[in-house]
Image (cartoon, rainbow, N blue to C red):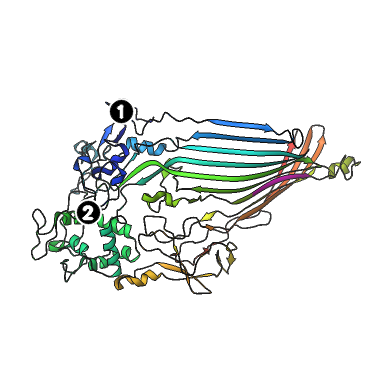
Amino acid sequence: MPFEGQGLTVVPKNGGGLALLGISGRSLDNWLRPDNPIDLSLVTELEFVGPKTSQPNKSIYPKDFNNFGPAVGFAWELPWFGKGKTNVRGGYQISFVGGGHAGQLSNFILASAGFTNTATTNGPLDGSYFNTKNLSSLIPVTPNSLPMQPFPILKQNATTAAYDPNYVTPYIQNFTLSVTREVRRNLTLDVRYIGTRGVKLNGFYDLDIPNVFYNPRLFDALDRTRRGENVDLFDQIFMGLSLVTGRPGVNGTTERGSEQLRLNTTFRDLLANGDFAGAATQLNYFNGFGTGATGVVAGAAGERGTVLKRANQGINVPGGVTLAGFPAVPAGLFPSNWITANPQFNSTNLYTNSGSSNYHSMQVQATLRPTTGLNFQGTYVWSKSMETPLTGSNIANGLLTAPVFTNPAERNKDYALSPNNVTHDFRSNGTFELPIGPGKMLLRNSSGVLARVVEGWATSFIVNLSTGQPATVSAANMLYAGGVPDIGPGGFSSKGFGKVEWGPNFGNFFGSSFGSVTDPQCNAIADSLKSLCTLKAVTDVKSGQIVLQNPLPGRRGTLGRTTLELPGSWSFDAAASKTVRISEGKSLIVRMDATNVFNHPVPSAPTLSINSTNPFGFIQDKGTQIRQFKANLRFLF
């Protein structure tokens, strides 16, 4: 179990990783609930655990002692169809994969928010010369907070992370079954099934995502505001404040909160393009602007979200904000966890067993051992690989990259083809020694100079063919990330494409099949937002019907992830060599290798965002693959 050697291992107190929910509780049942009450006794705090602390038996994540990884197998020589001709083998194995997250562990141990504090000095601020002789008067710099103290509930720009208290070691299940048949003395055929299942794989997600899609009042207010309506909710939030330079403060009658929201530079683009998660995030941290009667009173140092905090205190009610001439707003409508679960932090990553994967394949391999100078091996794989979004590896810093969930609360709905899935793959290689020279089919009786010239010629080749990898047609993020489009009334099929068509300068994955128009939802929003809506839809050029369009806010696109297959690839490499025997035990080999013999390019990845400024399916170039020749000379003795 990892720990810091001097007793400085820190974890959240009282609840482990679930303590990241802070004042919203200690259960994921309390996550994304706008009606969840605040419990100020549950603020996220840190504690020291592990060796050299008062809690030596505690650790960053639970100890896992039941990791039993059996490996069993069998081999059976079938007594039928010829003795020793057919063999059947199979096996099953469980492998535990607990590594791969050293970067995260070091961060948890040494860089948790509240454990470290960076204190800096800028030297004299009066313009006088900075002399290092006076450095003793400037240091040590007084920290702005004490270590190991809870972060205040001020929505400050701080991040933290912890492990799920139920975290276990991920494991892989491997299944194999093969039949090997000796077809002839020099020809063997293998047929194999190979399967792999990843269970409880490493993953993480942010518990502080903005709660807008499970917050009916907020979602309805944003949706109606986008359509051009005025909503009481935004009057209550912005009462007495002006969001637009030169406009009077919101009063609920002549000046409406929704109207000013549509004109405010912070919110208008987000509203126009249906990014409600972005709009909710900005609202959660909004401090307003300006000074005077319509400005916002600044909060504590580093505090964000003073507008919602002010509205939650109430307007013209006991204990609230007094604004002469404005209507009352009840207190308690917008508690600090109304949008994010833990207002102590900007993000709270929970590391847990959120990943899973499946791989199934049939593999056929034929091996021809040397026969009259020819040997060959070819392998065909028919496979399918599925997974939930998994963490990636950043080799530069050892950290894991975040899985991209369309909605972290519905992670299994992102289960789809793996980005590296290849349905059909054929790989082959072989060599052929020309049957010419002493003892060969041709000129078998040659000798002397003639024999040295004609003998020892050989060729080799590598031929690979594979279908393309899956790709995702992307759209605007109408949930949290990984947005994909809706299939329009014209329908859309990913079949029938893959032959790239090239124009004078660029290519297109779909040829001239599709066009682009403004997304219909841009015409159904407020007039003041229409010019800011950059959403597009893809049309069938022949029928003019929309085939792909952006989903509405809060919706998951019906097309799904990794539903398009990119063009396949093939390659042919070859070599020719000549061996010249100089004397007994000494020979000279001259060899020429050629890669990409047919100079076949692999096109760059196409543009598959329906909202791109480039045409749908646009391909920039044909890649950088070139035909290469390489000669070498070798002397053997």
In the image, residue 427 lies in the stretch drawn in magenta = yes
Left or right of residue 81: residue 362: left
> Label 2 belongs to which residue?
305
Which is more foreground, mark 1 or mark 2?
2
- Residue 208 sits above or below residue 91 on the image: below
Magenta segment's dominant SS is strand
Q: Residue at x 26, y 68 (%)?
A: 263
**Rendered image quadrant of residue 286:** bottom left
Question: What's the magenta region?
Answer: 426-434
The residue lying furthest to the front in this view is 80
Instruction: Say if residue 397 shows up in the picture.
Output: no
In the image, residue 343 lies in the stretch drawn in magenta = no
> Label 1 belongs to which residue?
7
Left or right of residue 102: residue 564: right
Separation of residues labelled 1 and 2 (CA atoms): 36 Å
Percent position of residue 526, x then y: 30, 71
Q: Residue at x 30, y 40 (%)?
A: 18
- Quadrant of the snapshot with the C terminus: top right
- The numbered mark, 1 or 2, whose residue comes first in the sequence reads 1
Q: Nearer the viewer, residue 531 or 627?
A: 531
Percent position of residue 433, x then y: 79, 44
Looking at the rendered structure, the secondary structure element under dot 1 is loop
| Residue 237: image tag | none
Looking at the rendered structure, the secondary structure element under dot 2 is loop
Instruction: Say if residue 217 shows up in the picture.
Output: yes
Percent position of residue 157, x then y: 27, 48
Q: Nearer the viewer, residue 502 or 411?
A: 411
Q: Count neighbours of disc 2 (C-alpha within 10 A) and say few if under 14, some if 14 to 19, many if 20 or more.
A: many
Left or right of residue 324: residue 152: right
Left or right of residue 289: residue 68: right
Q: Count neighbours of disc 1 (C-alpha within 10 A) and say few if under 14, some if 14 to 19, many if 20 or more.
A: some
